[in-house]
Amino acid sequence: MRKFLAEVYKALKSAILGLKVTGKNMVTPAITVQYPDERLDLPIGYRGIPVLLSDAEGNLKCVSCELCARACPVECIEIQSHREEGKKIKVLDVYNLDATWCMYCGLCVEACPFDALAMSDQYELADYDLKNLVFDRDRLAEIGRRQVTETINFGIKTGGEPTR
Amino acid sequence: MDMFTAMHNGLVQMGVPLWLANLVPPLVKSLILLLFILLNCMFLIWMERKVAGHMQRRMGPMRTGPHGIIQSLADVIKLISKEDIIPSGVDRWVFVLAPIVAFAPAFAVFMVIPFGPTLIAQDLNIALIFIAALTSFVVISFLMAGWSSNNKWSLLGAMRSTAQLISYEVPLVISVVAVALLAGSLSLQEIVEAQRQSFWYILVQPLGFLVFLTASLAELNRSPFDLSEAEQELVAGYNTEYSGMRWALLYLTEYANLITFAAIASTLFFGGWSGPVLPPVVWFLIKVYFFIFLVMWIRWTLPRIRVDQLMELGWKGLLPLSLVNLAFTGVYVLIR
Amino acid sequence: MQEMVARTESPGIRSEELFVNMGPQHPSTHGVLRVLTRLDGEKVIDAQADIGYLHRCFEKIAEKRQLFQVIPYTDRTDYLAAIHDELVYVMAVEKLLEIEVPERAQYIRFIMSELQRIASHLLWFGTFAMDLGATTAFLYAWRERERLLDIFEAVTGARMLYNYLRFGGVRNDVFDGFESTVERYLKDFEKRLEDYHELVTGNRIFEKRTQGVGVITAEEAIAYGASGPVLRASGVKYDVRKNDPYLLYDRYDFEVPVGQNGDCYDRYMVRMQEMVESAKLVRHGLADMPSGDVMGKVPRRIKLEGDTYARIESARGEVACYLVGDGSDRAYRLKWRSPCFVHLQLLNIMARGGLIADLVASIGSIDIVMGEVDR
């Protein structure tokens, strides 16, 4: 009998303690972000889709050395280039990055000796068509020009604290 | 009730046959009740999501209307427009009938619930027996839904809820009987009247109320007793195979039952529609919504109980407690 | 092997076993686990785990890729505690190539690894509470984990799959103000932990659901090769951090929480206490973190020769990596020991004779990540 009552008391007490916690949290404001309307700031060094960077005149910095393609663990980068007559630098013809394969590891950016490639701050890549997820040279360059946050080549310190 | 009598008299004077004139007022009453239940259910679904959201430091639905207030309406439209799927292995008629069988008693109970001194569809003098009889009817629909679905999870869910509902019916009714003893009547209107003349019965029936609350949580299949549709164990229990409007009907039934129990709880223990200053209906709704909030609060706090512990709690915990309560109440009534 | 369950048979009433496929699409099988369950009513007679839905040939891939290219793949074995798996692989390679790791890099690895343990245990706490039906605790745990992931994101650039450790150090230094951010987080976290205990631990229903459920005795745990919290909950005081110290674990003093009964409740308590210990270790690490380089000297041409075995204490148990080189720049063979795979074999022992609800609690309590089970 005593055990029974003790059990009832314990169960009630613990339930009320729990109710207190949820009640307390109910009257404190929510911590979520209403996504499409508000967004969190990304830290510097965030790894979105890899993009091609351009120099001040708008020309791609890439010299088609194919180090990124070789560094890629999933082999999602396809590069084709040709050497123009009388010039030293190769011209980039095709640079396809298959975003369905890419795992955003950033090894391609680390491999790039010319800072021609960077992990962007783009993460909204959803599309209805898989074909659109193969990013070609022009689209990658376009996204690269849109880049707002500072890009970093790894090995240096990342900046910025988390926003929350 | 004057309005309905006037309606009846008017129809008879207009030359409408008597049987038809007799039929019209009840139909109008039930339509009003149906509208009340459906609107409230939709509001409750929204409220549940909001309460859950804020308890979990989220916002809940936000995108349809201000603070997502018409989210339920959007959901209803979606559910109506969905394809009506009857899986190939099911027992067709039973499958189709189950949601209707579930909804009808939940709706019928409202006939005897007093919303105000005169605002009651039918003041039965055996209202409590009527309620007890109708609410236990739900078992059949769950069993129908679970059995006909031809799905193992559904069947397990149906078995669980059958065992659960039958065993919790007993302490529930006994705790209600104690209130009937105090009031000396089975009519809800008279129970309210009795409380108006003395005090709210929660004051002398705290134990009875506790048993009633726990047992009705189990009757409602609400957490921590939501074993029959325990998502983590049985996927969705007896409504695994349901979709579209049929599923919506089962879902609505849950909330309709929730309103029913909140209404009964406030009538039996908290003086029903009685209260100062504000009109009776408002008092009634305030009390009902307080209970609904309490039930939601409990749902989003407690973990789920296990099926054997559920039986243990029902038979070894609540039943003795309710009997003790009944005995004490009897003694109290004698010496009063 | 199968227990015969006594049934009440009366003439005209026949009862038979119910065979149910629990999963791979089931809300509480933590991914794509399929449990072949034989039921007698609610009682579980037999539960066999069927795995392989997430197999990705990780070990074979590791033979075909260059050494540094494997690091992103190690992230994906145990994706809830990715740093730990990176660490064990990186440690194995460093052992074979005899690469020195600078002090600061060691400290960063140490802090990140303990933070990761907290993140992983938090997620486990949430999902375990969810398995028992306490939905709100789940979202509270995610709230805390989210802030931790923000810290990880700011340090490594990704939230879950970091690709952060390198042979000889870490890829980049932490951001300025890392110490104060983590310190602030730990303070809040410890306050929240009290909420968790009030909401879940002390709850009578929770205790009833977990105490005496899914018992693994110490003998069984050792015989099956269990490790980590699962082993410690059974009362065996074994922790790789203590028994075979790596990183800086021999420098700092910390408690290894041990259970007694080996039931779900003990596994729960062990993990909850481990989080507190991890927070302590992080504080120690932050206080002593030196400045300096984060990358050591790494030979330009890599020649992998000989074999080595590296092991660490991950959030789930002992993760180990056996690496064989044949003189080329790729691994000749990589063998991954994943604790989740081992623990999953204990499922039958835990679930047999219990109810369906106990089976769910048992699956939750061993903290499996299907990515690591199947690899």
Image (cartoon, coloured by chain):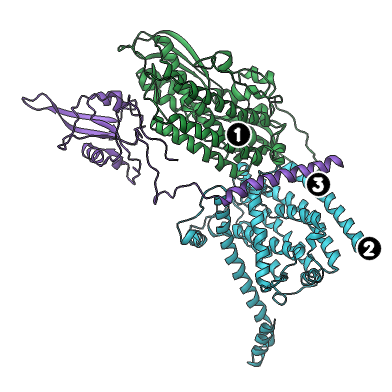
Q: Considering only vertical position in the picture, is C309 above or below C137?
A: above
Residue at the location (48% across, 38% down)? C146
Distance from Cα at disc 2 to Cα at disc 3: 28 Å
Amino acid at the residue labelled 1: Gly
Residue C158 visible? The answer is no
Residue at the location (40% across, 43% down)? A40
Residue C192 location (% of width, % of height): 58, 38
Q: Check residue B317 in the rendering and tell me which mark sits there, or answer none.
A: 3
Q: Earlier in the sequence, mark 2 or mark 3?
A: 3
Q: Return the residue nearer the eye: C33 or B313.
A: B313
Amino acid at the residue labelled 3: Gly
Chain letter for the residue marked with disc 1 in the picture: C
In the displayed structure, does residue B16 sit left or right of residue C305?
Answer: right
Q: Colour of chain B?
A: cyan
Distance from Cα at disc 2 to Cα at disc 1: 55 Å
Residue B183 location (% of width, % of height): 84, 67
Residue A134 visible? The answer is yes
Say which quarter of the image contains residue C225: top right
Letter of the chain in purple: A
Q: Are marks 2 and 3 on the same chain?
A: yes
Q: Tell me the residue that label 1 is attached to.
A: C364
Distance from Cα at disc 1 to Cα at disc 3: 29 Å
Q: Give the quadrant of the C terminus of chain B.
A: bottom right
Residue C70 location (% of width, % of height): 39, 22
Q: Tell me the residue that label 2 is attached to.
A: B335
Q: Chain C is drawn in which colour?
A: green
Q: Return the residue nearer the eye: B328 or C217.
A: B328
Residue A11 location (% of width, % of height): 74, 43
